[in-house]
Image: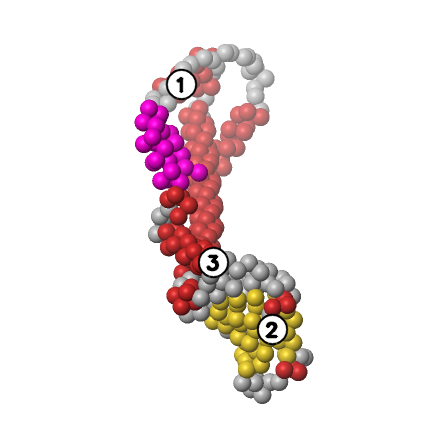
Amino acid sequence: MAIISDYQEEEQINASYSEPSASSKSETHLFSANFDTSNPQDFLRKVFDFVAQTSDFFQKDTAVEEVVSVARAAKVKAVVETAEKKKKEVESAKEAAAAAKKKKEVEASKEETAAAEKKKNQESASIVPNKGNGLDLENYSWTQTLQEVNVSVRVPNGTKSRFVICDIKKNHLKVGLKGQPPIIDGELYEAIKPDDCYWSIEDQNTISILLTKHNQMEWWKCVVKGDPEIDTQKVEPENSKLADLDPETRQTVEKMMFDQRQKSMGLPTSDELQKQEILKKFMSEHPEMDFSRAKIS
């Protein structure tokens, strides 16, 4: 019944606008009023007063019904627009939340990757060398002194030298068995003296390789670049081997060991200590000078 009534009202309204009487005369009047959002009824009252004063609209019997119909239509429109606005706000909020969540996940993933990489680098940098100041790897093991590097490669029992491929060059080492992929094949950590290097088969199950270092004042971190590296600050030369060195070399090695220990503890090296002593002596000899901004480099 409500629907029929509304329809009839709409027909009456349309009829009232579509079929004006011949005696009606169209006039235009200016309307001006302030709209206070806290008191919309006052504004409507002014509108109705204006309409009543400038037209005979309210003289019709259907005037109230027509006003109610217009108000009802405006209310429905406002409710629909409000609902659509809220729907858009909810959708926008969901999209923003989803975007923020995705961004957070991406940032968390980056942080996890960076942390894992940092941990990997720290672990790689802090590998403690074996008793021979080298490292035991899956395919081979190695030890070193300041002068030499000894590499041991395990091969099947009964292996003879004619089955072995061992190519020793100044900056490259290739070791393996004929007809099989190389066991070691890569650039050496540092240059060697090929003429002073050799290899042999021990017990028919191990390829033993001796590499003579070109620079005999430096510890190697690995044999082949790309393999795991040891922490050379944790290298511990045997005292008996130090005693076998000539005085000048032994002094250099002991200095290196001292500097490594100092660095590991965050303390100044021997060179830095010497510079500090020189500066202290100079300061004591020249008390009139200002050394507050002096830096040791």
Type of the residue with mark 2: Tyr
The secondary structure type at the circle numbered 3 is helix
Type of colouring:
secondary structure
Q: Do the residues labelled 1 and 2 touch (CB within 8 Å)?
A: no
Report the residue marked by disc 1: 35
Q: Which residue is drawn at 34% across and 35% down?
A: 281
Mark nearer the N terminus (3 vs 2): 2
Q: In the rendered view, tell whether residue 129 sits above or below residue 252.
A: below
Q: Determine which quarter of the picture holds residue 156.
A: bottom right
Mark nearer the N terminus (1 vs 3): 1
Q: In the rendered view, tell whether residue 232 sits above or below residue 158.
A: above
Residue 237 coordinates in the image, percent (x, y): 42, 64
- Of residues 249 and 72, which is closer to you in this image? 249
Report the residue marked by disc 3: 249
The secondary structure type at the circle numbered 1 is loop
Chain part drawn in magenta? 275-297
Type of the residue with mark 1: Phe
Q: In the rendered view, tell whether residue 153 sits above or below residue 268.
A: below
Question: What's the mark number on residue 198?
Answer: 2
- Of residues 147 and 14, which is closer to you in this image? 147
Q: Nearer the viewer, mark 1 or mark 3?
A: 3
Q: Residue at x 42, y 45 (%)?
A: 271
Residue 23 coordinates in the image, percent (x, y): 57, 15
Q: Is residue 217 left or right of residue 296?
A: right
Q: Residue at x 39, y 31 (%)?
A: 294
Mark nearer the N terminus (1 vs 2): 1
